[in-house]
Every structure is written in C-alpha cells, then in structure tokens.
Amino acid sequence: MKPVTQAGDWLADPGRFHGEWQGGAHGANVCVIVNEIETIGAGPRLHRHPYPETFVVRRGRGLFVVGEERIEAGPGDILVVPADTPHRFENLGPGTLATIDIHENGAFVTEWLE
C-alpha cells in the first residue's frame, strides 16, 4: 500500500486541478473527484450511489438536483446527498464550476439513471 499519492499520479491533467482518486487501493474508505466544469449547463447526468456523497463548491455556481429538491450552491457551500438518492448537477455560470466530490466508499459505485 502506497501511503502518499503524488498529484501527478491521479490528476487527469497536472496543469489543471481536476481528476479522480479511489482510496481503497491506499487503505482509505473514500474516493475523491475534483471537478472543473467550464461549460454552462454541463455536468453529470442523473445517477445515484449506495453510499453518501458530499460536494464542496470551491468556485462558481451550480444547480444541484437532489431527489426532488433543486439547490443553487456557490463558493463555500457544502451539500450532502444521502445514499441511494438520485442526483445530478450542472454549471450555472458565469465561469467555471469547481467542486470537490467526496464518495464515502473506497471505490466508485455509480448507477446511471439517464
């Protein structure tokens, strides 16, 4: 087990701060996605996980659909989506939506609903 992962090992493009990391291989029961969504209206389609997911909004504005609720979130907001709850989000603009998404599981498990 490698206790430290260097940024270049897991970031999709080391020149930009985005990518994903699965902690199970490193002894952690958590996965992390770092998003940089530039296009207004872009984001993942409706899905759910069998564990909670926490979103930390670092920059920009996003529309989060969590179950039947629609939530506009901005810098510093933190949202927790309960396990098995359908959810999606998109960039509202202007500018880039930057989030850190924390999955409470050592590996990603996603059921795409659309």
Image (cartoon, grey):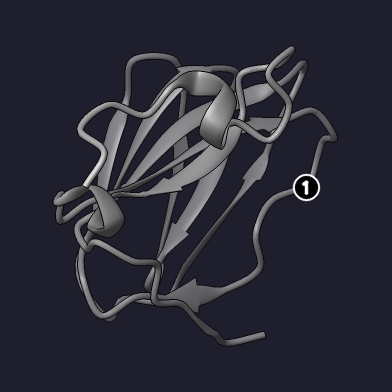
Is residue 53 among the parts visible in the rendering? no
| Residue at x-position 59% and y-position 37% | 19
Name above or below for residue 59 compared with residue 12.
above
Quarter of the picture holding the C terminus: bottom right
Residue toward you, 21 or 63: 21
Q: Amino acid at mark 1?
A: Ala
Q: In the image, residue 20 lies at what x, y percent? A: 51, 44
Above-or-below relation of 16 to 45: above
Residue 45 in picture, x, y percent from top left: 66, 68
Horizontally, residue 72 falls left or right of residue 16, namely left
Asked if one can make out residue 95 in the rendered structure from this viewpoint, the answer is yes
Crowding near the residue tagged with mark 1, few <14, some 14–19, many ≥20 C-alpha atoms within 10 Å: some
x, y percent for residue 88: 54, 61
Q: Secondary structure at mark 1?
A: loop
Question: Does residue 55 lie above or below 88 as drawn?
Answer: above
Q: How many marks?
A: 1
8 lies left or right of 77: right
Instruction: Out of 12 and 75, give the one closest to the viewer.
Output: 12
Q: Give the residue drawn at x 58%, y 73%.
A: 46
Q: Quadrant of residue 44?
A: bottom right
Up/down of 81 relative to 95, above or below: below
Q: Position of residue 9 (x, y in %)?
A: 54, 32
- Residue depicted at 43% across the width and 25% down the height: 57
Residue ID at (39%, 76%)? 109
Q: Residue furthest right?
A: 39
Residue occupied by mark 1: 42
